[in-house]
Amino acid sequence: MSFIAFMDPRERPPPSNVMIHSAMTTEEARALMEQWTQSPALRVHMEAVAACMGAYAETLDPNQRDRWIICGLLHDFDYEKHPTAEEHPFVGVKHLESLGVGEEIRTAILGHADYSGVARETPMAKALFAVDELSGFIVACSKVRPDGIQSLAPKSVKKKLKDKAFAAAVNRADIATGIEELTPLMHERGHAGFDQTAHIQACIDAIRGESERLDV
Ligand SMILES: [Fe+2]
Ligand SMILES: [Fe+2]
């Protein structure tokens, strides 16, 4: 795999006669993620987050859609090998740095772990945090429905969020914080009606778009 020169353009050295490869592709990011992650559930989680990131990129950063998808695909790629708060996502981010992955993606990945203390300042970082726990929750909701995600609506997701026994490992406070951080940004960008329901719907739609591949 060629990750050389997958760097933020601002960090790139001036062109030389050394061949510069194009940016890391989503397929290269997926291959890296699958190389580090054997768990089907964890792979599906990263794919679901990537689908949601792709959807939000269309609104917030349309020219960088692939970068946003790559951020989603890689945000937990080190988790299976390094699950502790001492290591995840720091080990992964360090590896990405060695591959030349740009600062925006690395900082967003650090920011998805609240305990890292890294502020979520960019739209990418805010979106990643807002979709991370929620996409896991949407997949969990789909698993208990006869038609999976096909007829899932925000109303039933919200009902399940209030049921503390359902998917108890999903952090409801993080979901709420994510929406709080994303909402002003969406309003600024002209999406005046954006709220919790709109966010849940956007994530359902994004994951549903990949439902066959992800088996949800
Ligand atoms: Fe994580
Ligand atoms: Fe995650």
Image (tube, grey):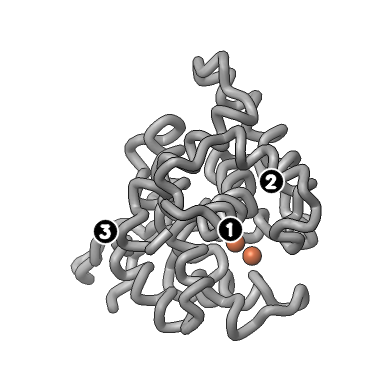
Q: Earlier in the sequence, mark 2 or mark 1?
A: 1
* Amino acid type of the residue that numbered disc 2 sits on in the rendered structure: Lys
Helix, strand or loop at mark 3? loop
Contact? badges 2 and 3 (CB < 8 Å): no
Q: Mark 3 points at which residue?
A: 15
Residue that carries the numbered disc 2 in the rendered image:
160
Please provide percent x and percent y for residue 189. 51, 20
Q: Quadrant of residue 13?
A: bottom left
Dot 2 beta carbon under 8 Å from ligand 2: no
Instruction: Tell whether label 1 touches label 2 (CB within 8 Å).
Output: yes
Asked whether 164 or 26 is in front, the reply is 164
Q: Residue furthest toward the front?
A: 146
Residue type at mark 3 is Pro
Tally of numbered discs:
3
> Quarter of the image containing the C terminus?
bottom left
Badge 1 density bin: few <14, some 14–19, many ≥20, Cα 10 Å: some
Q: How crowded is mark 3: few (under 14 residues within 10 Å), some or many (20 or more)?
A: few
> Is 112 left, or right, of 190 in this rendering?
right
